[in-house]
Image: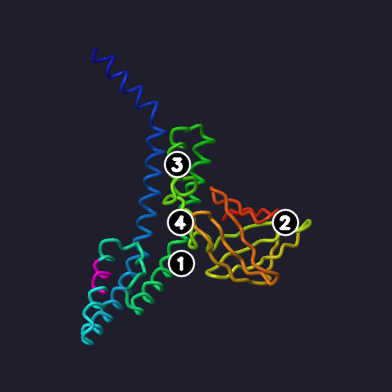
Amino acid sequence: MKSILIATISGCLLFFPAAIKGQEKLLGLKKHKESAIERVITPLNKAYLGKLDELMDHLTTSGELNKALVVKNEIDRVGRKPSESLEEENIPERLALLSRQRSAALERALAPIERKYHKELDRLLRNYTSAGNLEAALKVREELAKYRDGPSSDDEEKGFSKAFLIGTVWEYAIGNNPDRLQFGDGKVLVLKGDGSGNFTPGDSREWEMVEVKKRQIRIHWNSGPLVATLNSRLTEMESGARVLERVREDD
């Protein structure tokens, strides 16, 4: 009986090593992402908290107790939830400004981390699928689904935000030559293609979010606003009859 048990355990260990290694790689990616986020959030929050301390001192000295308490609550909240932004409602104007500046800085800093994480998950999924390691591939796909195909609005908002779009490039065809749009913070740059894979910078336009839950953005062209909607996987952008495809970072 003992020999049968040992043989069974040995067989399981021989059957599952690829899946175990797959889980280890996925866990490693998650930890790497978390460490990268902590490295960018810590100095931003340190600077933010320093400005909040100055603001609270000023309000306290001025005798504005209620406003000072609101600032103190924000200081405590950042300590508990360092990656979240303040809900701007009935707060001092100076605090609202500082909070918006911090939120914008967080978006800019976190966007490349999220994009790199998505890219590495995509690569891992392809590698596991082509190697026949389907169990590990399914785990990676489940992680991707949290950002791309989640059924709830909370999951959807995690995957699609202004921060997600910043730095991404989208390609569309005009005649025989494909052009590209490169998204920056509030600006989108047109990259004109010559048909041979080369792109040169052209005009730039302002853009903004329209609605996160519907994954819509608005680009302000001279001829009028263009509203585009992204698919659930955040790989295509549709505006009328025109479809733009997201360009992979290694293309």
Instruction: Determine which residue is flagged by label 3.
Output: 140
Dot 1 falls on a residue whose secondary structure is helix
| Residue highlighted by disc 1 | 108
> Quick check: 204 left or right of 46?
right
Q: Earlier in the sequence, mark 2 or mark 3?
A: 3
Q: Residue 209 appears at what percent x and percent y?
A: 53, 63
Question: Where residue 92 sits in the image (x, y, percent)?
Answer: 32, 77
**In the image: residue 64, left or right of residue 138:** left
Question: Callout 2 environment at 10 Å: few (<14), some (14 to 19), or many (20+)?
Answer: some
What residue is drawn where x is 37% and y is 47%?
28
Q: Which amino acid type is shown beneath numbered disc 3?
A: Val
Magenta stretch in the rendered image: 71-76
Q: Amino acid at mark 1?
A: Arg
Compared with 35, 206 (above or below) is below
Amino acid found under the numbered disc labelled 4: Glu
Q: Is 29 above or below relative to 127?
A: below
In this image, 240 relative to 144: left or right?
right
Residue 173 is tagged as 2
**Which residue appears farthest toward the right when viewing the image?**
175
Measuring 34% from the left and 61% from the top, which residue is drawn there? 38
Are the two marked residues, 3 and 1, in contact with CB atoms closer than 8 angstroms? Answer: no
Q: How far separated are the C-alphas under marks 1 and 2?
A: 29 Å
